[in-house]
Amino acid sequence: MKSFIAILVIILIAFYFPFHPSADDSPDWIARSILQSILVTAFKPAVYLRDYVSNDVGIWYLRNFMQFRHEACPETEETIIEEFIFPIHMWRPRKAKKTDLMPTLVMFHGGGWMMGDIDVHRRFYSNIAAHLNMVVISPEYTRSPSSKPIPSFPDCLETLKHIIKNSESLGINKDRIVLSGDSAGGQLTLAVGLYLKQEGLSVKGLVPLYPMTQILSIHLKSMQTETKYMIHHEGVAWSASNYITMDTSLIQAVKSGELYQAALQRDEELVSSRIGIENFHEDTKLFSQKISTEISGVIDLVMDPRVSVLLAPDEMLANLPPCHIFAASHDILRDDAILFHKAALAAGNKDIQLTVWEGATHIEQAFSKFWLNKTLMPQSDIWIGEYLEQIKRFALN
């Protein structure tokens, strides 16, 4: 009887939590596959709640059931700059003197612009501060859906302006600032970087981690072939829609290719040169119907460099500060990073680098000792260590 019950329990667990194996070339395969299975399965109720209850309930689930709060590293002191428009968190190594003007990393957290927060990233950011002996600053930027489109970008730009203006009182060296972030935070890193010259600002470097660089299409090769690993392209469409229209009205246009066709009609030369159909998966069926009025009304915002950094003018790409992009081979955003790197080089930028970690997936930092406080996947420690060393090189050179 006990054996029967045990088998039944195993069958039920397998039914509700199907196994999603990692890629054959991924290191730490067993641990990675288990975590991947949990994350992929946990995302499914969010889509169900979004489609059958409401967008807000789906996002509420993401924010409350797919996030874990962490304590700060005890080797750092956390300060919250509350007098600003929104809270800005700062972690300073305790061993640093109060009078030291420290090199500083400004981090924009990931989460598709609609989830993720400081509580989730606190341990990671404070561990970075202790490990690199740098100040780490991160804004609690406005997430979507909000009362206006693209709410996150202006908050991130204003954060940088504020800390540069008040650098001495904050104990930071304004001439040694580096920007970074993962996923949507990587997109925000590049977006802010594009507008630095226009705003009269400068930083030592940008280190985006698997950034999202466009929201026109989910039909790039990596979006289709790597969608079974960690994050699904359904999440990209959902995030993009909330960021632009504050609801789910754009999801189908992203998935069907209507958004891409509308962009082609608006500027065929630019779109074809940056996101040509030769980069699409071979099974892609191009949208061939008439573009709706609703999509025509938002396409300019979708193509705006503050959103689709891949479509930025050559001059903006050429004027980026030194930049090193890190991407993962088994990530749906891999081709986003590759295409952005290619576009920047074509624009004349000679100070941009790209590293693609073979066997890695999205949110690799969450599997590292810098996030977990212990080694679970040794190769993740190595990869994230490389990423942190690049931040240090930019800050100190």
Image: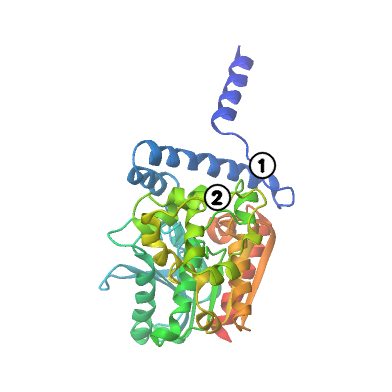
Residue under label 2: 231
Q: Secondary structure at mark 2?
A: loop
Q: Amino acid at mark 2?
A: Ile
Q: Amino acid at mark 1?
A: Pro
Q: Is residue 139 left or right of residue 178?
A: left
Figure disc tally = 2
Displayed quadrant of residue 296: bottom left
Q: Which residue is the site of mark 1?
A: 21
Which residue is drawn at the image coordinates 44% and 56% (left, top)? 240
Horizontal and vertical percent for residue 301?
Answer: 39, 66
Which residue is painted at 57% across and 52% down in the image? Answer: 286
Asked if residue 210 is positioned above or below residue 391 in the image, the reply reads: above
Instruction: Give the left or right position of residue 57, taking residue 72 as reference.
Output: left
What is the CA distance from the residue labelled 1 to the residue labelled 2? 13 Å
The residue most toward the top is 1
Residue closer to the observer: 23 or 254 = 254
Residue found 43% across the figure and 64% down from its top: 302
* Residue 70 can be seen, yes or no: no
* Relative to 64, 3 lies left or right: right
Taking depth in this image into account, of 94 and 363 the one nearest to the observer is 363
- Where residue 166 appears, x then y in whole percent? 33, 84
Give coordinates of residue 52: x percent, y percent. 37, 36
Given residues 351 and 103, the one toward you in this image is 351
Q: Position of residue 149 (x, y in %)?
A: 34, 62
Secondary structure category for the residue under label 1: loop
Name the image quarter holding the C terminus. bottom right
Res 185 label: none
Crowding at mark 1 (Cα within 10 Å: few <14, some 14-19, many 20+): some
